[in-house]
Image (cartoon, rainbow, N blue to C red):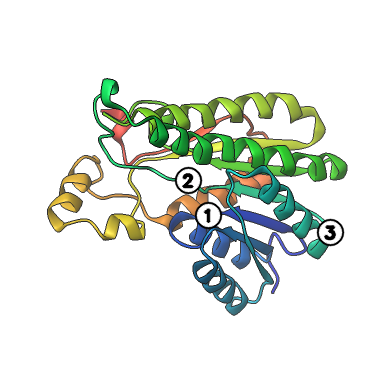
């Protein structure tokens, strides 16, 4: 298929469902070949099938982003199959219960797990994504953070800390590699209509929708569209920023 990203290769973590799947499909629709990384093989392979339906090549790679050896193997397999890496969307993350319990009662293992996936995972992905981009002297990385990365999510200590960390990592990496042809940005969504959100009670969904001035939550495809823009030529002057997608919450 012909598209603005034909001949390019994109990697998306947590691409088995939700935002990650929408991003993977958006890359495919632009003509890119897409590496689908996820801890769930059935979900990841389903995303690959959807990618192939729109005419692009898809490759599923199992990966727990909190494990350095698995992230390294993921990048090596990407390069071994496609020979290059042009775009990376580091989307994989977990939330945990909300609220997480008062600070004196905070589960230390839960804290470690959320930080390992959400923050260490992004660091490890960038660690192994940057070298091939340096070799090419081109590449774009988009990290999926959260509104909790610039504000706070009440009662969510670990999640808020992890997403603030993602925003900070994004800024440091953007500054470090700006002259090397690599751009690094983040997206900070508010609530998005993912499968997890759809499992909530109608009352909870209505409550969450009412928190957004636009009267609804975001759609995965809207986040994906922002990723594509950040990876494209029209955003060539954009690096080190965090794009807020919150339905007007930050205007309140």
In this picture, is 139 found above or below 173?
below
For the point 65% across and 48% down, the residue is 88
For the point 26% across and 45% down, the residue is 214
Percent across and percent down for residue 111 are: 41, 32
Identify which residue, 97 or 176, lies in the foreground.
97
Q: Quadrant of the C terminus?
A: top left
In this picture, is 65 found above or below 61?
above
For the point 59% across and 39% down, the residue is 122
Nearer the N terminus, badge 2 or badge 3?
3
Identify which residue, 103 or 38, lies in the foreground.
103
Q: Label 3: few (<14), some or many (≥20) within 10 Å? A: few
Q: Label 1: few (<14), some or many (≥20) within 10 Å? A: many
User: With 6 as the anchor, is 124 left or right in this view?
Assistant: left
Q: Which label number is shown at residue 83? A: 3
Mark 2: which secondary structure?
A: loop
Query: Can the viewer see residue 236 in this picture?
Result: no
For the point 59% across and 47% down, the residue is 65
Percent across and percent down for residue 132 are: 81, 45
The residue that disc 1 covers is: 14
Alpha carbon separation for disc pair 1 and 2: 7 Å
Q: Which label number is shown at residue 93? A: 2
Indicate which label's residue lies in the foreground, 2 or 3.
Answer: 2
């Amino acid at each position: 298929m012909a598209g603005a990203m034909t001949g390019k290769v994109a990697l998306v973590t947590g691409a088995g469902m939700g935002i990650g799947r929408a991003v993977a499909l958006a890359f495919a629709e632009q003509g890119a070949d897409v590496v689908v990384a996820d801890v769930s093989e059935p979900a990841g392979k389903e995303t690959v099938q959807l990618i192939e339906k729109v005419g692009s090549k898809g490759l599923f790679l199992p990966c727990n982003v909190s494990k350095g050896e698995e992230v390294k193997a993921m990048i090596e397999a990407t390069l071994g199959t496609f020979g290059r890496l042009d775009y990376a969307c580091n989307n994989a993350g977990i939330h945990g219960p909300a609220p997480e319990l008062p600070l004196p009662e905070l589960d230390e293992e839960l804290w470690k797990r959320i930080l390992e996936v959400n923050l260490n995972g992004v660091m490890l992905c960038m660690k192994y994504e940057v070298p091939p981009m340096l070799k090419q002297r081109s590449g774009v990385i988009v990290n999926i953070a959260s509104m909790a990365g610039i504000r706070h999510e009440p009662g969510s200590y670990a999640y808020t800390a992890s997403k603030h960390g993602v925003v900070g990592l994004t800024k440091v990496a953007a500054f470090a590699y700006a002259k090397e042809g690599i751009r690094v940005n983040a997206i900070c969504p508010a609530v998005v209509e993912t499968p997890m959100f759809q499992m909530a009670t109608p009352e909870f969904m209505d409550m969450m929708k009412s928190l957004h001035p636009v009267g609804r939550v975001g759609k995965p495809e809207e986040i994906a569209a922002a990723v594509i823009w950040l990876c494209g030529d029209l955003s060539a002057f954009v690096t080190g920023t965090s794009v807020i997608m919150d339905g007007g919450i930050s205007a309140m």
